Image (cartoon, helix red, strand yellow):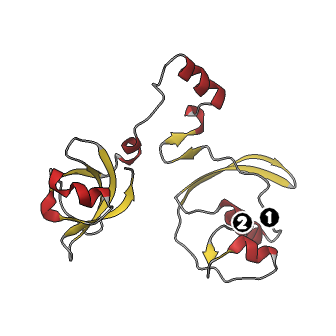
Amino acid sequence: MYSALKVNGQKLCDLARKGIEVERKARPVTIHKIQILEINLPRVCMRVECSKGTYIRTLCQDIGEKLGCGACMESLLRTRVSEFRLDGALRLQQIEELVQQEDFSFVQSVDSVFMQYDFAQVMETAKKMVENGNRIPKEMICNMCQEKEQKCIRLYDWEDRFIGLYAYMPQEQDFKPIKLFI
């Protein structure tokens, strides 16, 4: 398998290049849609809508195996990742021009990509804990929605600045940092 996934500290793609085969565990993924855009044998161009964690190279190999003819991926163009779409992307030259005009309207706040998560606020008394990336006791969190095990939340400081993503740990009665942006 040609993949950057690691097994025992080594990338699968490096092992594959050395001719070492490693049995890969099946991972659940969802293929929402496959659309054939063009057939020009031996090439087939297709659009795939899939869940996170899907390896398109492996999907191509699996399709070729099922058809009994083999297949490999020649090129890949990601047209969307989460809410970011290729048709909404800016080229470097466009960004440079906007910056020259002092137009920063294209800049998004970091927390804007995590709006699917509930939010909470930490008290100022937890300042050192936040700065050190420590777990935060439940008592130091306010303005929080329901507590759910391993539920990811956006955490903001006492001045409404985004800190990062935390998960509630019910047994410990605290919030564990997942990703920090401070």
Q: Are marks 2 and 1 in contact (CB under 8 Å)?
A: yes
x, y (%) of residue 127?
A: 22, 54
Q: Secondary structure at mark 1?
A: loop
In this rendering, the answer to whether 82 lies above or below 88 is: below
At label 2, the amino acid type is Ile
In this rendering, the answer to whether 149 lies above or below 76 is: below
x, y (%) of residue 9?
A: 62, 78
Badge 2: residue crowd in 10 Å (few <14, some 14–19, many ≥20): some
Q: Which residue is mark 2?
A: 63
Q: Which mark is residue 180?
A: none
Apparent side of residue 102 relative to residue 61 in the rendered image (left or right): left
At horizontal 18% and vertical 71% (from top left) the residue drawn is 173
Q: Secondary structure at mark 2?
A: helix
Apparent side of residue 134 relative to residue 38 in the rendered image (left or right): left
x, y (%) of residue 94?
A: 61, 25
Q: Which residue is mark 1?
A: 71
Badge 1: residue crowd in 10 Å (few <14, some 14–19, many ≥20): many
Quarter-wise, where is residue 20 in the image? Answer: bottom right
Depth check, front residue: 98 or 127 = 127
x, y (%) of residue 89?
A: 58, 34
At horizontal 76% and vertical 51% (from top left) the residue drawn is 75
Q: Is residue 81 visible?
A: yes
Mark pair 2, 1: CA separation: 7 Å
Depth check, front residue: 18 or 51 = 18
Quarter occupied by the N terminus: bottom right
In this rendering, the answer to whether 139 lies above or below 143 is: below
First along the sequence among labels 2 and 1 = 2
Depth check, front residue: 107 or 32 = 107
Apparent side of residue 51 relative to residue 147 in the rendered image (left or right): right
Quarter-wise, where is residue 141 in the image? Answer: bottom left
